[in-house]
Amino acid sequence: MITKEIANKIYNLFKDKDESKTLIYSNQTDVFVTNKIWLVKIPLKYFPTLPTFGPWTESKTPDIFFGDEINQTPSVIETKALGSALRRIPKEIKTVNIMIECPECEGSGFVPCEGHCPDACDNSCYHKAARCTLCGATGKIKNGKTYLDYVPIEHHYIKCKNIYFDPYIIEKVYYTGILVKSDNIYYLKERIEGPNRFQIEDIEILIMPTLIKDISDYTIIELKTKYENYKLTI
């Protein structure tokens, strides 16, 4: 059973450790937390007071991503099986830089050229866009702060129904199952290139898969699913 305390733990689980990457949105029924790689939908009823967050800055609201048609007979992933697969993947401690918006280009990655191109152009490119040299056109710079993260070693992936997942991402689904104390995770929608949809009680999660062309370059841990006569509640 999901309580307000558990819902709050799930809410914090999906907030990116680099808070600049976290986006939070709410409507009249749900709260959404995303970093554009994972997205969780938690019913608003679990929050006695609405979590505080900044304005939603994206052009699309996240609730639209839950409107797709789902499998009428979803696959079932056993929570303990996902945990077992994750434990087979070695981890390492990494120092991660916290990034902030580049003050030079204001996060766009480009600045007005103003005739100062690396190439001679006789000022003919004035006011055209040039790559920002401060951030290398990424729109982000280091703010001097770091944090330590215990992450799976690169080139190890979880395979489920011919779809590959970064273990660092799919472990969010596993930890949600542990917090809710659910034996099963329902795999509602699988996509090779788009968001994959999972449900644990009335918590719904979207995570992005990883595209792999040649599996010989990677270590793959296969995760089996099963089917049950499951009555959809959404």
Image: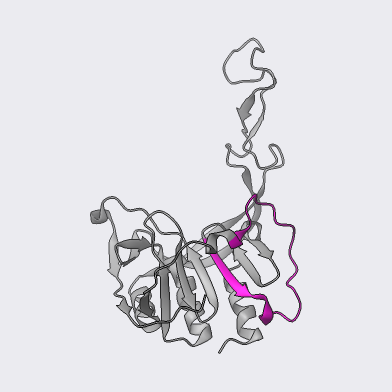
Magenta stretch: includes residue 178: no
Looking at the picture, tell me which residue is in the foreground, 199 or 123.
199
Q: In this view, does 179 lie to the left or right of 74?
A: right
Q: Is residue 47 left or right of residue 187?
A: right
Q: Which residue lies furthest to the top in this view?
A: 122
- Front residue of this view, candidates 47 and 73: 73
Please report the bounds of the magenta region as a residue range: 38-63
Q: Which residue is drawn at 76% across and 78% down?
A: 49
Q: Position of residue 201 (x, y in %)?
A: 51, 82
User: Is residue 16 shown left or right of residue 222?
Assistant: right
Q: Which of 26 and 128 is in front in this view?
A: 26
The percent position of residue 207, horizontal first and vertical second, equals 47, 63
Residue 10 location (% of width, % of height): 58, 76
Whether the magenta-drawn stretch holds residue 51 is answered as yes
Q: Quadrant of residue 123?
A: top right
Q: Is residue 41 left or right of residue 186?
A: right
Residue at point 60% right, 84% down? 6
- Please, is residue 8 above or below residue 190 in the view? below
Looking at the rendering, in which quadrant would you find the N terminus?
bottom right
Of all residues, the one furthest to the left in this rendering is 216
In the displayed structure, would residue 30 be above or below residue 207? Answer: below
Residue 114 is drawn in which quadrant?
Answer: top right
Q: Work out which residue is located at the far bottom of the displayed protein and give it.
A: 1
The percent coordinates of residue 165 (x first, y second) are 38, 63
Looking at the image, how many numbered discs can be counted on the residues? 0
Report the residue at 54% width, 60% height from top.
Answer: 65
Q: In this view, does 46 lie above or below 94?
A: below
Q: Which colour scheme is used?
A: one colour
